[in-house]
Amino acid sequence: MAITYTIIFDVLPAEHDRFLSLLNGVLDAMRAEPMFRQAALHRDPSSPYRYMLYETWDSHQDVLDVQLQRPYRTAWHAALPTLLTRDRDIAMWEPVRRDGWG
């Protein structure tokens, strides 16, 4: 069953460019994964350093067992504690309906 994650990031202002550079590298690599469905990065209109990532995968178990171990995520995961003001807020959702986005 498909699973969607929403992940909230509160970025340290001094690390903003590095945060985006590392995250964009991960997002670019994810597109080639066979279990990947979609992702969208949003910025909070009231805070230029607060982001929400929305991503959907075919399988939660695959994310845990395979995707989180991909080499292209190593630098990203190692850097997270130095990029954020607090731990990420991660939630999981099961898709029920989708409109738009082709």
Image (cartoon, rainbow, N blue to C red):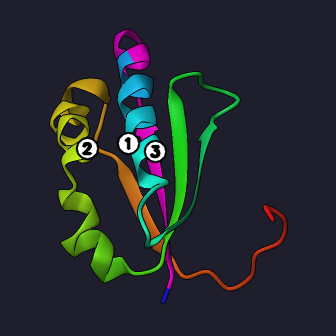
Residue that extends furthest to the top in the rendered view of this protein: 14
Residue that extends furthest to the right in the rendered view of this protein: 100
Residue that badge 1 annotates: 26
The amino acid at mark 3 is: Leu
The amino acid at mark 2 is: Tyr
Residue that badge 3 annotates: 27
| Disc 3 crowd, CA 10 A, few/some/many (<14, 14-19, 20+) | some
Residue that badge 2 annotates: 72
In front: 41, or 13? 41
Q: Quick one: label 2 or label 1, which is nearer the N terminus? A: 1
| Residues at marks 3 and 2 touching, judged by CB atoms closer than 8 Å | no
Residue at x 28%, y 63% (from the top left corner): 67
Residue 15, magenta (yes or no)? yes
Range shown magenta: 2-17
Residue 42 at what x, y percent from top left? 63, 41
Relative to residue 16, is residue 38 depicted above or below? Answer: below
The amino acid at mark 1 is: Val
Residue 81 at what x, y percent from top left? 20, 33
| Disc 1, SS | helix
Residue 86, magenta (yes or no)? no
